[in-house]
Amino acid sequence: MTLSSSQLRRAAALQEKIEAMQSELAQLLGGSVSAAPAAEGKPGKKKRVMSAAARKKIADAQRKRWAKQKSAAPAADKKAK
């Protein structure tokens, strides 16, 4: 879809109005109001950090589930034959 220059100017004007309204709303609410904080370069929620011990615990549990699944699969195949 191609836009004419007048449509582009109108879109830019609307975008400016939206941004002005968002900043006004943020001032009223005392915080940052944004539909897409990552797109505007504003920091969003902080990324959660997991400790090495927690990562190891999760990985060990997943390996245990995989091992259980692998050991159960051949038994089911033998019964089907």
Image (cartoon, grey):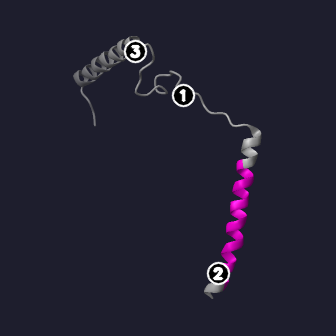
- Residue 70: % across, % down: 70, 69
Disc 2 crowd rating (10 Å Cα; few below 14, some 14-19, many 20+) is few
Q: Position of residue 6 (x, y in %)?
A: 22, 21
Q: Is residue 74 above or below residue 41?
A: below
Q: Which mark is residue 81?
A: none
For label 1, the SS is loop
| Part of the protein shown in magenta | 58-78
Circle 3 packing at 10 Å, graded few (<14), some (14-19), many (20+), is few
Residue 41 magenta = no
Q: Is residue 18 above or below residue 73?
A: above
Q: Residue at x 69, y 55 (%)?
A: 62
Residue 30 relative to residue 50: left or right:
left
Please tell me whether mark 3 or mark 1 is closer to you in this view. Answer: 3
Which secondary structure type mostly characterizes the magenta part of the structure?
A: helix
Crowding at label 1, few (<14), some or many (≥20) Cα neighbours within 10 Å?
few
Q: CA distance from mark 3 to mark 2?
A: 62 Å
**SS for callout 3:** helix
Residue 71 is inside the magenta segment? yes
Task: Look at 41% across and 23% down and name the residue there.
Answer: 34
Amino acid carrying label 2: it is Asp
